[in-house]
Amino acid sequence: MFPKIAVVGAGITGVLTALACAQKGAAVDVYDLNGIPNKENNSWAYARLFRTVHDNSPHLEDLALRSEAFWRTMQLQTSEQLIHPVNVIRVNSEPTLRVLRQAYTAHHHESCITELDSTSLNSFFKIKNSNHKVLIGNDGLLLNANLIYKKLVDLMTKNRNIRLIPNSKLFANGLPSIREHKILKETYSTIIFSTSAPVNTDSKAVRKKFQYHIDIILKPECKFKDAILDLGDDNKTWCVPSLNGKKLKLSASEFSFYDPPSELLKRECREYLLDMIKAPQKEVSETVSSYYEVNGEQYYDGNRWKVDKENGCVLMEACNAQHFKSAPATANDISDHVFQ
C-alpha cells in the first residue's frame, strides 16, 4: 500500500518533494498558507545562483552535484531559458584565492587567478584594493527561479497523485496543530514541513535574519552576466545578475541583520552599495528580505532536514534562498526516507 503524505509549504523544496513522492506512487496533499504558486515565498525571484563549489561545505557540494543534473535536464525539456552558465568571481588576496582554487581542482572544474586589469570588473565596479587578484570559476548556473517554480507547480497540478490545498490555516501554528488534530495522523503516514519559517516556534536552532539588498536596472547599453561572490571589500559585497544581464541584485554578506534595519542603516547600506558600482543605472530599488537560518549552519547529521518521530513529521527548520539550488537532491533524499 502506498503512503499518503502531507507536504506543508509549497515553495521549491515542498513542490519538488511532492513531485518526488508522487512519482514513487504516494498520494500527496500540498498545503500552503497562501496561494499555490505563492509569489510571496523565497522561491519567487528573477534569478538564483547555483554553484557546485562551496567553501568548506562537503555536504552542500554533494547536494549541488546531485541537483545540477536535474536543472540541466529540466532545461533540455523546454525552449524557454531556465538556466544560464556563468562565471563565479571572487576578488581577494592571491593566497586566499589559491586556497579557494584547490576546491575547483578537486572537483575538476576549470578556474584561473588573474589580474584585475585583465577583466571587465573595473568598468562596472569600484574595487577597493587594487592589489587584489581575481579568481574566476566556471561552476556557476543562473537559475530563472520564478519560471522554474511556475513550471514545477504546473507539473503538480497535472499530477493525479497530488492535491493542492492553498490558503490553508490548518497548519498555521506548526507542530502544536498536529497534536491538536489527531485525525491528521490517521490520514497521513508522514507530514513533511518545508516552510520558510520554522514550525517549532520554541526552536533555538533557528534565528530570523533580515537581508538588505538593492536591485539595479542597468541602462540599455550595459549588461553584466557574471556572478560575484566577493568584491574584496570588508563587507564582502556580492552581485547576482538576471539571466539577460540587464538587472543586478547587489548586497553584502555583512548586510544581514538580526533586527529589521532602521531607516538610517538602510540609507547607509544603500549608499555603500551604490558607491561600489560604476555602471550607469536606469533604476534602483531597495528591499529587506526576511529569512530564517539554522544557527551556525549546523544541519542534522549533515542534512537540511530531520525526522520528528514523535509527531510523524519530517522537518526542515528553515527553507531559505540557499535551499532553492539544492532542492532537487534534498527532495529526493526526503522521498527516499518516506519510502524506506
Image (cartoon, helix red, strand yellow):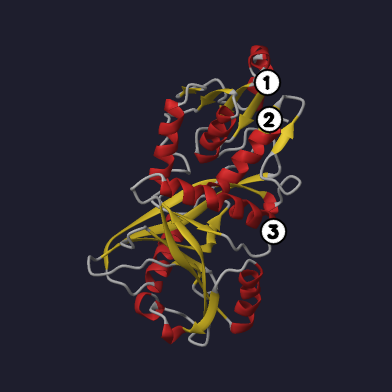
| In front of the other: 76 or 209 | 76
Q: CA distance from mark 3 to mark 1?
A: 32 Å
Q: In the picture shown, does residue 124 fall above or below 36?
A: below
Q: Is residue 315 in sight in this rendering?
A: no
Name the secondary structure under disc 2. helix
Q: Are marks 3 and 1 in contact (CB under 8 Å)?
A: no
Residue at (73% x, 49% y) in the render: 302
Q: In the picture shown, does residue 220 fall above or below 22?
A: below
Q: In the picture shown, does residue 102 fall above or below 199?
A: below
| In front of the other: 138 or 311 | 138
- Position of residue 111 measured from the top left corner of the image (x, y, whole percent): 54, 74
Residue at (53% x, 83% y) in the render: 132
Residue beneath disc 2: 338
| Pointer 1 local density, CA inside 10 Å: few below 14, some 14–19, many at least 20 | some
| In front of the other: 79 or 39 | 79
Q: Earlier in the sequence, mark 1 or mark 2?
A: 1
Q: Earlier in the sequence, mark 3 or mark 1?
A: 3
Snapshot quadrant of residue 254? bottom right
Taking the image as shown, residue 60 lies to the left or right of residue 48, namely: right
Residue beneath disc 1: 189
Residue at (38% x, 66% y) in the render: 225
Residue beneath disc 3: 58
Q: CA distance from mark 3 to mark 2?
A: 24 Å
